[in-house]
Structure formats: structure tokens, C-alpha cells
Amino acid sequence: MPIALKAGQKITCTITKTPRKAAAIDTIERLMRQDPAVKRGLRRAQRRRRQDMVVYNRGNRDWYKREICGKQVAAKTGATWTMTYSHQILPELASLEGYVSVKGA
């Protein structure tokens, strides 16, 4: 990475080119889920799914019908997110260098 980053620093990432590889898309979406606003939305949705879970009886045993999770993020060109930098994500950011631009916030 050409930019010097310190652990704990806020960084802003922007997708410059949509990747075609499924692994790169998964990595970008995993990093996008580190955004505090997205984390809040995921936590809220999980809590809501748990509250609205349907419990029914089948063979004198409780069965649970869980709602399918919605996708909060999409790896598309122009998508931007902010997250805290740590040294553990450096290899992931390096592997996405052709798809994501990183700036210190």
C-alpha cells in the first residue's frame, strides 16, 4: 500500500473497479461489513429476526422458522465505507489493490 497507515486509524475505502472473482467480491463485502453503520444495521436486523421468529409444534416438538438474512452491502463501483484500520487487514487490502482505493480519514 502506498499510504502509511497506523493501527486504530480511521480509513475510507472506495471501490474503483468491480471485481469479477467471487473471492474478491467476498473479501470486499466482508471489509464493508466493518463499517460501524453497517454493523448497527446487521445487529438490528438479527435482533428483529430473532424477535419475529415463528415457533410451531410438529410431532410434539418445537420447530423454528427463521427468516432469511438480507444483504446489507454490495460490492459495486463507487461504493464507499469507513472502518478502523488494523494490521490484520493489510494482506486483504493488498490483495484488493486493483479494485479498492484506501485513504486515511
Image (spheres, grey):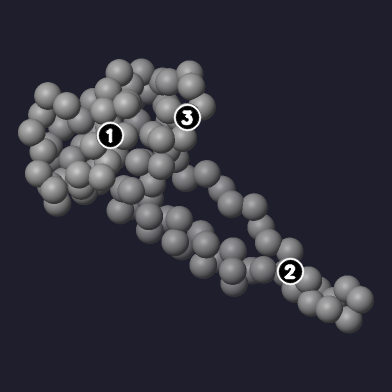
Relative to 79, say whether 40 is above or below: below
Which residue lies under the disc numbered 1? 91
Relative to 42, say whether 71 is above or below: above
**Residue 77 x, y percent position in the rendering:** 37, 23
* Pointer 1 or 3: first along the chain: 3
Residue drawn at 83 percent across, 78 percent down: 61
Q: In front: mark 2 or mark 3?
A: 3
Q: Nearer the viewer, residue 20 or 74?
A: 20
For the residues marked 1 and 3, what is the alpha-carbon distance in whole angstroms? 14 Å
Q: Quadrant of the N terminus?
A: top left
Callout 2: few (<14), some (14-19), or many (20+) C-alpha neighbours within 10 Å?
few
**Residue 98 x, y percent position in the rendering:** 30, 18
Amino acid type of the residue tagged 1 in the rendering: Pro
Residue drawn at 64 percent across, 69 percent down: 52
Q: Secondary structure at mark 3?
A: helix
* Pointer 1 or 2: first along the chain: 2
For the residues marked 1 and 2, what is the alpha-carbon distance in whole angstroms? 40 Å
Q: Are marks 1 and 3 in contact (CB under 8 Å)?
A: no
**Residue 88 x, y percent position in the rendering:** 25, 45
Which residue lies under the disc numbered 2? 64
Left or right: 60 with respect to 1?
right
Amino acid type of the residue tagged 2 in the rendering: Tyr
Callout 1: few (<14), some (14-19), or many (20+) C-alpha neighbours within 10 Å?
few
Left or right: 52 with respect to 34?
right
Which residue lies under the disc numbered 3? 23
